[in-house]
Image (tube, grey):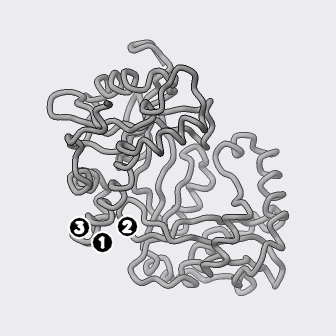
């Protein structure tokens, strides 16, 4: 039986304590540790199911269909890496695409350091090399590009809704929101993304428009809004409640202005309007933005959100020691 099925798995609360220690100091002010730890433990409890459920492993094996890979090899593994460092490692696939596998660090016995990377690399390839993973993904609260030799991935941009709603910026009177009731404008939103992708080919990898199911879910939750400029539909802004990094969060599902209304300085005001439209109640507005999507990241920062860390990647395709 794989080690992941043994009784040596860490507890969700033990993993939560380490994860909390790795968070950006600013976020420690947004929610007391004693309230945040249970939320992190809940997230780790869900992750640990992937280390024990052969049923889920079998479903993943049937979906991805790798030859000569047994279902139990899809299980997450709690493994000794080196010295006092153990890690919960997971095989993941970007966008559920079997051609884009990577290994995720889903839990640790202590915060990782740069000195741990060679051993983490060896462990990742030793456990999941049969999948041909392209990189190892880790969380870091360090500033963007602060870790030499590691590649940037997605960044977390967040701030308490109450703080965002309280900004004193003058909002143009013609810019308003109204609750979205249906998918009338979804095709226009898709066309706006297509136009951006055509102008900036990298954008297609960095961001994608929400689909009909996601839109319907946000509409039902009452947290999706039409952006209006002088009463004319100009885009979407909306969220869904999803705890993130142990924070009670409203996760951005869409923040879009169509091309005809860009370049007028409306962008940062959308966040303010959205924060005022949502019930604050101690919640955090949380968005995940590709680190290379400089425009979206800059807009989020201008709107008052803060970069509180993100994922970094260690390439697993190159032989160890091979130059970049």
Tell me whether the residue at label 2 lies in contact with that at label 1, contact meaning CB atoms closer than 8 angstroms.
yes
Total count of labels: 3
Tell me whether the residue at label 3 lies in contact with that at label 1, contact meaning CB atoms closer than 8 angstroms.
yes
Residue ID at (38%, 59%)? 245
Name the residue furthest left. 84
Q: CA distance from mark 2 to mark 3?
A: 10 Å
Tell me whether the residue at label 2 lies in contact with that at label 3, contact meaning CB atoms closer than 8 angstroms.
no
Q: Position of residue 41 (x, y in %)?
A: 29, 59
Which element type, helix, strand or loop, lies under badge 3?
Answer: helix
Tell me: residue 321, above or below residue 27: above
Residue 249 lies in quadrant: bottom left
Residue ID at (48%, 66%)? 242
Residue ID at (54%, 68%)? 303
Instruction: Write down the residue under mark 3.
Output: 33
Left or right of 251, for residue 160 = left
Left or right of 151, for residue 261 = right
Mark 1 surroundings: few (<14), some (14-19) or many (≥20) residues within 10 A:
some
Decide which of 138, 196 is in the foreground and name it.
138
Mark 2 surroundings: few (<14), some (14-19) or many (≥20) residues within 10 A:
many
């Amino acid at each position: 039986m794989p080690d992941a099925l043994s009784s040596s798995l860490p507890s969700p609360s033990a993993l939560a304590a380490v994860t909390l220690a790795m968070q950006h100091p600013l976020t420690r002010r947004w929610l007391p540790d004693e309230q945040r730890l249970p939320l992190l433990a809940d997230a780790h409890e869900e992750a640990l199911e992937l280390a024990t459920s052969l049923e889920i492993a079998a479903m993943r094996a049937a979906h991805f269909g790798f030859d000569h890979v047994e279902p139990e090899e899809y299980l997450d593994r709690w493994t000794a890496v080196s010295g006092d460092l153990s890690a919960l490692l997971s095989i993941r696939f970007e966008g559920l695409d079997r051609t884009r596998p990577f290994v995720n660090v889903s839990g640790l016995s202590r915060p990782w350091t740069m000195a741990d990377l060679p051993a983490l690399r060896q462990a990742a390839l030793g456990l999941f090399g049969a999948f041909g993973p392209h990189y190892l993904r880790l969380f870091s609260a360090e500033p963007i590009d602060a870790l030499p030799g590691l590649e940037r991935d997605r960044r977390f941009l967040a701030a308490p809704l109450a703080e965002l709603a309280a900004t004193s910026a003058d909002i143009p009177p013609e810019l308003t929101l109204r609750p979205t009731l249906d998918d009338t404008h979804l095709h226009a939103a898709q066309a706006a993304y297509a136009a951006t992708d055509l102008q900036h080919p990298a954008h297609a990898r960095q961001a994608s428009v929400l689909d009909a199911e996601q839109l319907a879910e946000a509409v039902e939750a009452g947290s999706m809004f039409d952006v209006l400029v002088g009463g004319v539909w100009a885009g979407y802004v909306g969220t869904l409640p999803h705890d993130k990094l142990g924070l009670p969060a409203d996760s951005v599902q869409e923040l879009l202005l169509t091309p005809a209304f860009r370049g007028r300085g409306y962008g940062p005001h959308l966040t303010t309007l959205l924060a005022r439209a949502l019930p604050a109640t101690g919640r955090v507005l949380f968005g995940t933005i590709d680190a290379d999507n400089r425009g979206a990241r800059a807009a989020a920062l201008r709107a008052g959100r803060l970069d509180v860390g993100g994922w970094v990647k260690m390439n697993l395709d190159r032989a160890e020691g091979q130059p970049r």
